[in-house]
Image (spheres, rainbow, N blue to C red):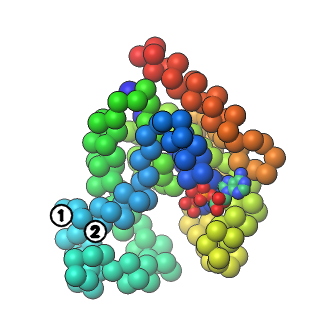
């Protein structure tokens, strides 16, 4: 089975594109959702988070999101530390999940595929590209937030153009090109590649 990564900058439309693949019957692993679930439930990860971020990290066994967010939001090193704890556990969970699927190919959607090293466990990577001004506007509308907040999140990610160069395929999700035909074309390509294996 072919393992495909789906990545892109904040607000590029990763989730939107992933949902289209899902409507075609392709299983999708959402890494951010999985990481949140694993922070609550994974018995290896919880003690590590407590060790580095303190007992307040959990309340009644559940991750204290507000507390963790208040620490990592303005501290790049702390964010990187949290990611370095969650990424290996999420990567392992994704691998187990992907290997259980029976479709010709599966998709792992993640914002930080290259940064986390997860790209190495995948056969192909799709990048979702949208110009920065469109991404910022979409996230402001979606999250009802300010340009300053969105720009802070954008500045933490690696350069979008550079990221797209690392991808095997790019879906352009600006306001001009239709997305569904691009997804259908890739679906055809991966199904053909799966037959060849
Ligand atoms: P994040 O990195 O924050 O998780 P994302 O890359 O998953 O974001 P989405 O949540 O899919 O991006 O898209 C961001 C917002 O833009 C959503 O509200 C989505 O509905 C909207 N959006 C995505 N693509 C388009 C499009 N082609 N036209 C209009 N709106 C779009």
**Up-down relation of residue 42 to residue 73 (above or below):** above
Q: Quadrant of residue 186?
A: top right
Q: Nearer the viewer, residue 2 or 164?
A: 2
**Up-down relation of residue 107 to residue 75 (above or below):** above
Q: Nearer the viewer, residue 77 or 12?
A: 12
Residue 60 appears in the picture as rendered: yes
Which quarter of the image is occupied by the N terminus?
top left
Give me the residue at 22% from left, 82% from top: 60
Give me the residue at 55% from left, 47% from top: 19
Badge 2 density bin: few <14, some 14–19, many ≥20, Cα 10 Å: some
Q: Quarter containing ligand 1? A: bottom right
CA gap, disc 1 and disc 2? 9 Å
Q: Nearer the viewer, residue 18 or 155?
A: 18
Badge 1 density bin: few <14, some 14–19, many ≥20, Cα 10 Å: few
Query: Residue 69 at x, y = what percent?
Result: 43, 79
Q: State whether label 2 is within 8 Å of ligand 1.
A: no
**In terms of secondary structure, where does tag 2 sit?**
helix
The residue that label 2 is drawn on is: 40
| Extreme residue in the right direction | 176
Query: Residue 133 at x, y = what percent?
Result: 76, 63
Residue 148 appears in the picture as rendered: no
Which label sits on residue 43?
1
Which quarter of the image is occupied by the C terminus?
top left
Give me the residue at 29% from left, 80% from top: 57
Give me the residue at 65% from left, 76% from top: 144
Query: Residue 48 at x, y = what percent?
Result: 23, 69
**In terms of secondary structure, where does tag 1 sit?**
loop
């Amino acid at each position: 089975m072919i393992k495909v990564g789906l990545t892109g900058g904040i607000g590029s439309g990763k989730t939107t594109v992933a949902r289209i693949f899902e409507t075609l019957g392709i299983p999708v692993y959402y890494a951010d959702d999985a990481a949140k679930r694993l922070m609550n439930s994974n018995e290896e990860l919880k003690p590590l988070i407590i060790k580095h971020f303190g007992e307040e990290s959990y309340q009644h066994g559940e991750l204290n999101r507000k507390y963790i967010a208040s620490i990592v939001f303005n501290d790049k090193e702390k964010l990187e530390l949290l990611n370095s704890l969650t990424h290996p556990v999420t990567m392992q969970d994704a691998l187990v999940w992907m290997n259980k699927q029976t479709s010709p190919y599966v998709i792992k959607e993640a914002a930080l595929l290259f940064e986390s090293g997860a790209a190495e466990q995948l056969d192909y990577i799709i990048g979702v590209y949208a110009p920065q001004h469109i991404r910022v506007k979409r996230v402001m509308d979606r999250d009802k937030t300010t340009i300053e907040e969105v720009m802070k999140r954008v500045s933490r990610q690696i350069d979008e153009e550079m990221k797209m160069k690392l991808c095997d395929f790019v879906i352009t999700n600006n306001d001009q090109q239709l997305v569904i035909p691009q997804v259908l074309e890739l679906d055809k390509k991966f199904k053909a590649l799966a037959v060849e294996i």
